[in-house]
Image: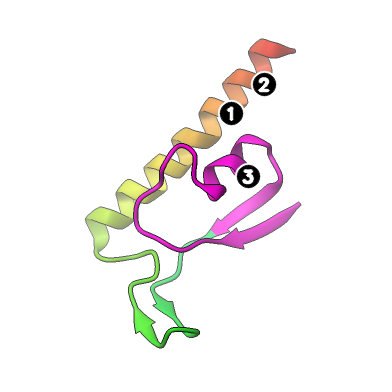
Amino acid sequence: MLTVGFDGFVLEPNSPIALVIHHKQIRGIILIDYDFKRHARQRNIRNPAQLKRSITELQNMTKETDQYRMNSA
């Protein structure tokens, strides 16, 4: 299992990070406020409200995947 990061502020259902979560190929996700490669602020974090939304969306994606796996077993 891996811990990964991703680019962006909005989590789309078919985004690469959502697919990785769905397939349970990662162990954790890192949200980053500074992108060293681009020398720019705000890679995943704009403000506290957006950060909370992102965390909630990631948790919901994980819960949905867990529910699906439990119901399919």
Task: Give the x, y percent position of residue 34.
Answer: 40, 79
Q: Residue at x 56, y 49 (%)?
A: 16
Task: Determine the secondary structure under disc 1.
Answer: helix
Residue in the image at 67% along x and 17% along y: 70
Query: Which is more foreground, mark 2 or mark 3?
Result: 3
**Which label belongs to residue 42?**
none
For disc 3, the neighbor class at 10 Å (few under 14, some 14 to 19, many from 20) is few
- When the figure is inspected, residue 17 is found, relative to residue 19, above or below; the finding is below
Q: For mark 1, what is the residue?
A: 65
What's the amino acid at mark 3?
Val
Label 3 sits on a secondary structure element that is helix
Identify the mark at residue 69; answer none if there is no mark.
2
Quarter of the view holding residue 41: bottom left
Q: Nearer the viewer, mark 1 or mark 3?
A: 3
Disc 2 marks a residue whose amino acid type is Arg
Disc nearer the start of the sequence (1/3): 3
The residue under the point 75% across, 13% down is 73
Judging depth in this view, the residue of 57 and 8 nearest the camera is 8
Q: How is the image coloured?
A: rainbow
Q: Residue 7: say if magenta.
A: yes
- Check if residue 72 falls in the magenta segment: no
Magenta stretch: give its range. 1-29
Q: Is residue 60 left or right of residue 65?
A: left
Residue drawn at x 61%, y 35% as measured from the top left: 22
Q: Are marks 1 and 3 in contact (CB under 8 Å)?
A: no
The percent coordinates of residue 56 (x first, y second) are 38, 42
In this figure, which residue is indicated by the disc labeled 3?
20
Q: Label 2 neighbourhood size at 10 Å, few (<14), some (14-19), many (20+)?
A: few
State the separation of the CA atoms marked 2 and 3. 14 Å
Q: Quadrant of residue 24?
A: top right
Q: Is residue 28 left or right of residue 32?
A: right
Is 21 drawn above or below residue 2 in the view shown? above
